[in-house]
């Protein structure tokens, strides 16, 4: 039997490209008419007007030579691209951005020049394209070589071929050159056909001094001595791949290596002083590669896999084939300062990027509008791979699940899980089309009528309510094939029903007192229990919560609060539902309930509602006091117990619970007294630092430790703590340091902005900072980057008043040309609108509900 993950992979390959553009797609565009006589440069105009490249020329093989100079921080290069011409033309159109092209020529298959003169190169900067004119017609069906020489500065920022730095413990600044090309930045490093469907082979050579090493997608096959101290590393030709997956790095890092069971060499690279933090990642990567080869039943096609921690890196990681790049926090693990959550993060990110080596690299989307499926599958495989290789980390699984092999991964159980629902006549293609070809997820509304359940499916929306005039319009045409599961109190059987129409019904019998839809939350849909359905669920949890699995209890909590946000359920119903949590022993539902209380607490504390805020604080502390008091300030316990400890104690100290503050202050004093040599329990270190950061001496001491720490995990915890101060001058200083990029790296600025915005004293500071520095931020991070998105969504996400919405709208209007290109601005507006509606619907309900609880 084929595991379900591989079925999806096969289905995906039908829609996505495996190598070259299809013949039909190549006929869509026509080349400019060929010209028999050469033209003078002044008579040429750019031959192509479209954003997408023409399909009549296809790259086959790149021969790329690069020489980065880490003293002048510039690079020179040559590229020879073998091309296949499929229509007669005089023009080759491809991508280039910021490169000074000093020479261009075209050669035939025998490497003879088609012209005695250097060829004209025309630029279209708005589309980041160049056009190279050949006086002789390039003939259909023939292959040619396009040769170019170029140079550029190593880029500032985080895209293209860019410079990065790190500082040694002696204070020396060291340079390296690294790449990040996804989605469209390979053109900043060398002229290329920079679209994912143009797959080709790459033969890379890199020149360097003896003080450095070079890395690329493939292993070095030969190193030759050039003049002086210069060496040239020659890398093996790559498999066919897209330009955004090409990578090369010149650095002085150290590595640790091991072999997988199939003979793939795995290496982890980091700056020399952090070499000891690479060993856990090596263990994970070897296990993951072995797992994926077995799971996909496809051998990893390269001889090596390098994973490297880059000091300046904007995203979390990047799946360059054979050379995956990471933020240091996503790859390095220090047992003395990294918490269990840090360990889980590293494991999950490695699982994600290695999944891409098959899904994304081996099989690639034709264009960027399918990136969601690329990333969605890798996200899915994070959980599958971690459950298989590190069951002790227990990711959405518990000890009981692994004992029974019920729903978590095991090699025996996986194929059974894939066909639990299917039977022989399931139309997998029809079902999957409803999930992959339309956006969003369904809301299933359940109404009990005697022995039957009446079912209705709608598109789940947080921003539009059924009473809104536009409801019907936004629902039009949406329909899913939903594999429903449910169980009742009269049977231990999990029942299954395929819902393929807008309305449906199932028979459950008169004697069933309750029914739980979406057993163990295995389905991707929201469930709403109409009429008194939520009261029935709340009563069940109060009287016999273990009648439902911990997953079902978690799912009920999640659904209830999602429905509150969407306006389908009053807040008091959701609060009544989680009233049972004082009886809850399992950490997952506890964390889920706590997370939702914390979310709307953070909204309310930023409003001018001191009495309501204080009453909610009292309620949360009273409600969770038993859980708080039983926590130890240590790193003992299971993974889920340790994660609960971190969350509970962090919230308790934030709410200024005296016993929590006392313990945290004592730990902080001990840490200060030891001059930072004391290793705090990693799971509570962030809480301890946050409490210690509330006075001047503590804040300054933490900042000094931040400057010298070699542990990115520790620095992250300190940075969060520094952002919790109530001193607005210190918050301003953090923002300024992030913008400057010396003490706090530029890569962390968006995180600093987000953290300051979480602070009630820093919300407007962070928002004003983004507005005042907008042009600088866009120049530093690029308009569509994750950093810009984080800053926009992070600062506006806590706004909840019509006045704040107006202010956000006015700012977006003032940058209209840029904001129109950003999905993040629309998301930000929707979030503020959602918050306003939440407040309008629920504030009085919460106020009255809390008053009742306080009696």
Image (cartoon, rainbow, N blue to C red):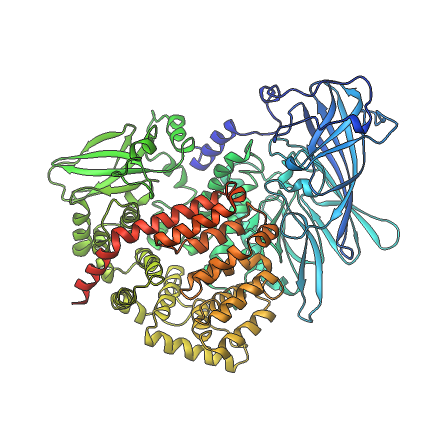
- Position in image of residue 609 (x %, y %): 30, 64
Q: Residue at x 80, y 56 (%)?
A: 210
Is the residue 644 above or below the residue 365 in the image? Answer: below
Quadrant of the rendered structure where residue 709 is?
A: bottom right
Residue 613 is situated, as x and y percent measured from the top left of the image, at: 29, 65
Q: Is there any visible trace of residue 745 in the rendered image?
A: yes
Q: Position of residue 172 (x, y in %)?
A: 71, 67
Kindly identify the residue that appears in the image at 62 percent across and 38 percent down.
Answer: 301
The residue lying toward the viewer, choosing from 13 and 848, is 848
The C terminus appears in which quarter of the rendering? bottom left
Q: Residue furthest bottom?
A: 673
Q: Nearer the viewer, residue 640 or 542?
A: 542
Location of residue 671 in the rendering, given as x and y in whole percent from the top left corner: 49, 78
Q: Is residue 492 visible to us here?
A: no
Quarter holding residue 527: top left
Q: Answer above or below: position of 665 versus 145.
A: below
Q: Is residue 811 left or right of residue 266?
A: left
Q: Which residue is at the front of the view, 236 or 165?
A: 165
Q: Is residue 668 above or below residue 520?
A: below
């Amino acid at each position: 039997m084929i595991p379900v993950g591989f079925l999806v992979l096969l289905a995906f390959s039908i829609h996505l490209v495996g190598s070259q553009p299809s013949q039909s797609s190549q006929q869509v565009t026509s080349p400019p008419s060929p010209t028999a006589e050469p033209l003078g440069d002044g008579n040429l105009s750019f031959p192509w007007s479209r954003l997408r490249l023409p399909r009549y020329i296809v790259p086959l093989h790149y021969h790329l030579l690069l020489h980065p100079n880490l003293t002048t921080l510039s690079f020179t290069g040559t590229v020879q691209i073998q091309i296949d011409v499929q229509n007669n033309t005089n023009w080759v159109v491809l991508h280039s951005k910021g490169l000074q092209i000093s020479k261009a020529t075209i050669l035939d298959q025998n490497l003879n020049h088609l012209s005695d003169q250097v060829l004209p190169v025309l630029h279209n900067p708005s589309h980041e394209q160049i056009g190279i004119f050949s006086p002789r017609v390039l003939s259909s069906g023939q292959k040619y070589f396009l040769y170019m020489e170029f140079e550029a500065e190593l880029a500032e920022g985080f895209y293209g071929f860019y410079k990065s730095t790190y500082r040694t413990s002696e204070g020396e600044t060291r340079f390296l050159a690294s790449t990040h090309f996804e989605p469209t930045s390979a053109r900043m490093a060398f002229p290329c056909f920079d679209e994912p469907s143009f797959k080709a082979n790459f033969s890379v050579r890199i020149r360097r001094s003896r003080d450095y090493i070079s890395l690329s997608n493939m292993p070095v096959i030969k190193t030759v001595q050039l003049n002086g101290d210069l060496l040239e590393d020659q890398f093996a030709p790559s498999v066919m791949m897209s330009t955004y997956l090409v990578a090369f790095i010149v650095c002085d890092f150290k590595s640790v290596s091991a072999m997988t069971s199939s003979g793939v060499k795995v290496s982890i690279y980091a700056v020399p002083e952090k070499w000891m933090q690479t060993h856990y990642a090596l263990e994970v990567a070897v296990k993951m590669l072995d797992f994926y080869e077995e799971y996909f039943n496809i051998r990893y096609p390269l001889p090596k896999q390098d994973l490297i921690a880059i000091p300046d890196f904007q995203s979390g990681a990047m799946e360059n084939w054979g050379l995956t790049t990471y933020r240091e926090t996503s790859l390095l693990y220090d047992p003395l300062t990294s918490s269990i959550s840090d360990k889980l993060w590293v494991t999950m990110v490695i699982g994600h990027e290695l999944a891409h080596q098959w899904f994304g690299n081996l099989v690639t989307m034709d264009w960027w509008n399918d990136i969601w499926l690329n990333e969605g599958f890798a996200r899915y495989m994070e959980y599958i791979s971690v459950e298989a290789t590190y069951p002790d980390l227990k990711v959405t699984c518990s000890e009981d699940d692994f004992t029974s092999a019920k729903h978590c991964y095991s090699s025996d159980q996986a194929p059974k899980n894939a066909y639990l629902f299917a039977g022989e006549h399931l139309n997998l293609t029809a079902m999957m089309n409803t999930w992959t070809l339309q956006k969003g997820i369904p809301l299933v509304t359940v109404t009990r009528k005697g022995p039957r359940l009446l079912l209705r499916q709608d598109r789940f929306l947080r921003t539009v309510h059924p009473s809104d005039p536009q409801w019907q319009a936004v629902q039009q045409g949406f329909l899913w094939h939903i594999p429903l599961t449910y169980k009742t109190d009269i049977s231990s059987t999990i029942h299954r029903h395929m819902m393929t129409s807008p309305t449906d019904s199932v028979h459950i019998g008169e004697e069933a007192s309750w029914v739980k839809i979406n057993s163990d939350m295995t389905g991707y849909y929201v469930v709403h229990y109409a009429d008194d359905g939520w009261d029935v669920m709340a009563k069940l949890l109060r009287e016999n919560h273990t009648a439902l699995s911990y997953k079902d209890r978690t799912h009920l909590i999640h659904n209830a609060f999602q429905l509150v946000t969407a306006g389908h359920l009053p807040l008091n119903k959701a609060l009544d539902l989680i009233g049972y949590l004082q009886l809850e022993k399992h950490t997952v539902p506890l964390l889920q309930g706590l997370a939702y209380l914390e979310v709307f607490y953070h909204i309310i504390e930023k409003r001018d509602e001191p009495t309501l805020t204080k009453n909610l604080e009292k309620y949360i502390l009273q409600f969770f006091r038993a859980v708080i008091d039983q926590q130890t300030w240590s790193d003992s316990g299971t993974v889920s117990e340790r994660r609960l400890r971190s969350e509970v104690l962090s919230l308790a100290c934030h709410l200024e619970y005296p016993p929590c503050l006392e313990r945290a202050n004592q730990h902080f004093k001990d840490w200060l007294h030891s001059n930072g040599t004391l290793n705090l329990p990693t799971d509570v270190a962030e809480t301890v630092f946050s409490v210690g950061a509330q006075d001047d001496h503590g804040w300054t001491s933490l900042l000094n430790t931040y400057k010298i720490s070699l542990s990115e995990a520790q620095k992250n915890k300190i940075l969060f703590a520094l952002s919790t101060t109530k001193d607005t001058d210190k918050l301003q200083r953090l923002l300024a340091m992030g913008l400057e990029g010396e003490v706090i790296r530029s890569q962390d600025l968006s995180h600093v902005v987000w953290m300051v915005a979480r602070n009630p004293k820093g919300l407007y500071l962070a928002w004003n900072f983004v507005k005042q520095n907008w042009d600088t931020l866009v120049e530093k991070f690029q308009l569509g980057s994750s950093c810009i998105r984080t800053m926009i969504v992070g600062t506006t996400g806590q706004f909840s008043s019509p006045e704040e919405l107006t202010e956000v709208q006015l700012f977006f209007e003032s940058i209209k040309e840029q904001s129109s290109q950003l999905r993040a601005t629309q998301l930000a507006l929707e979030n503020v609108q959602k918050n306003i509606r939440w407040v309008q619907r629920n504030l009085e309900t919460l106020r009255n509900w809390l008053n009742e609880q306080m009696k």
